[in-house]
Image (cartoon, rainbow, N blue to C red):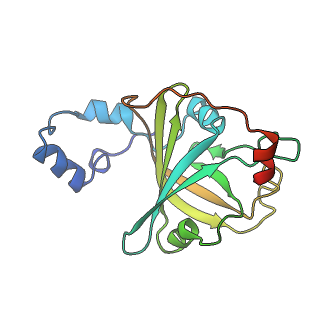
Amino acid sequence: MAEIPPDDWLHEGEREAQRRFGADDAWDAAGLSAMFRDTVPPALAAYLEGLPFFFIATADAQGACDCSFRGREHDASGRPYPLLKVLDERHLVFPDYAGNRLYNSLGNMLVNGHIGMLFVDFERRNRFRVNGLAEIVEDRAAHADLWPLAQRYIRVTVEQAYGNCKARIPRMSLLPATDSELQDE
C-alpha cells in the first residue's frame, strides 16, 4: 500500500468545510492514512472488475462538471465483456463504446484529465471511489482482446482509491438482461 503525503489527503476546501461544519477533529492522520491509497490493492481490483457498472465525473477546462454512466457491453450470446481491467496497482483501463456522439466525457478529458469514478454495489451495499488522471487511448487494437466492440479506451492513473460508508445505499438486486434488452444495445 502506498502512503499518500498528509498534505494531499484533503484539499483546502475540504479542510475549510470540516472547520465550518464542525468536523475539524473528525479525522486524524492515522484514520486518513488508513482510508486513502494511491493504489488499487489486488482484492479491490478483482472486486471492481466484477461489478456491472460505475459512474464517472469529468470537468471541462473551466471546471463545469459532467457525470456519466459506464456499463458492460455484451457479446452476441449475451455474455458480458469485462467492465474494466486493473493493469497494475496504479493504472486501470475501461472501454468507450459508441454512444450519443456528444463526447461530453471525452471532450472534458481532452482539456482536463481529472476523473472521478464511483462504484456502487447495491447488492452488497458497498461504495468505492477512484480519482485520478485519464488519458484517451485511440488505438482500437490496444485492448481489443477484452473489448472487441470498443471505439477507444480510457486509461486512468490512480491518485486516490478509497471506500465510502454504506449509509443510505438501498439494497437492490440486479436482474439478468432479457434477449430484447440485449438487442436494444
Numbered circles on residues, count = 0
x 47%, y 62%: residue: 58
13 to 59, vertically: above or below:
above
Residue occupying image coordinates x 71% and y 69%: 138
| Residue 155 screen position, x and y as percent | 62, 57
Looking at the image, residue 169 sits to the left or right of residue 178; the answer is left
Residue 169: where, in percent of width, then height? 43, 31
Q: Is residue 116 visible?
A: yes
Quadrant in the rendering for residue 170? top left
- Nearest the eye: 61 or 79: 79
User: Looking at the image, can residue 92 be seen?
Assistant: no
x and y percent of residue 88 in the render? 63, 44
User: Which residue occupies the extreme right position in the image?
Assistant: 77
Picture residue at 11% right of the left edge, 39% below the top: 22
Left or right of residue 14: residue 129: right
Q: Residue furthest front?
A: 180
* Percent position of residue 81, x then y: 77, 44
